[in-house]
Image (tube, rainbow, N blue to C red):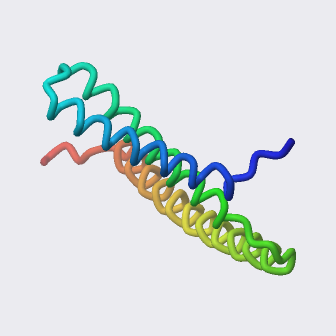
Amino acid sequence: MRFNPAIWRPLAIGAAVLNLAAAVWVAGRGGGFAHAAVHAVLALGFGLWAQRLAGARSQAPADPAQQLDNVEGELYDLRREVAELEERLDFAERLLARKAEEEARPKPEGR
């Protein structure tokens, strides 16, 4: 059996709303802070789960050509970032080499 976000998301939203209503109702009746807090935390948890289920459903494109385009775009971005990092590394190496040469050079006696 496959986990289907389209089925579980409305259930998670319903559970979040019911727990939020229960938290308000318990707090209004004076049923205790701990009891109301448990319902509030459950409402938050179910709400976050519903958001995650919505994101899981919208992340994967159905078209394989679109998936390939996305992967190619990410690969291009990664190559560009690696090239930038190589340039920065070369620059840092040149600075360190220059500093090492200056320290290795003998200092004039008069100054």
In the foreground, 24 or 63: 24
Q: Where on the picture, by quarter, is residue 65?
A: bottom right
In the foreground, 50 or 22: 22
Measuring from the top left, give residue 78's x and y in whole percent: 65, 66
Query: Is 80 placed above or below 3 here?
Result: below
Q: Which residue is drawn at 64% across and 49% down?
A: 8
Q: Where on the picture, by quarter, is residue 24?
A: top left
Q: Which residue is drawn at 64% across and 57% down?
A: 56
Name the residue at the front extreme.
Answer: 29
Q: Which residue is drawn at 23% across and 30% down?
A: 26
In the foreground, 53 or 99: 53
Q: How many marks?
A: 0
Measuring from the top left, give residue 95's x and y in whole percent: 42, 56
Q: Which residue is drawn at 39% across and 48% down?
A: 17
45 lies left or right of 36: right
In the foreground, 72 or 87: 72
Q: Where on the picture, by quarter, is residue 30?
A: top left
Query: Is 76 placed above or below 101 here?
Result: below
Measuring from the top left, give residue 60's x and y in whole percent: 72, 65
Measuring from the top left, give residue 64's x and y in whole percent: 86, 74
3 lies left or right of 45: right
Quadrant for the N terminus, please: top right
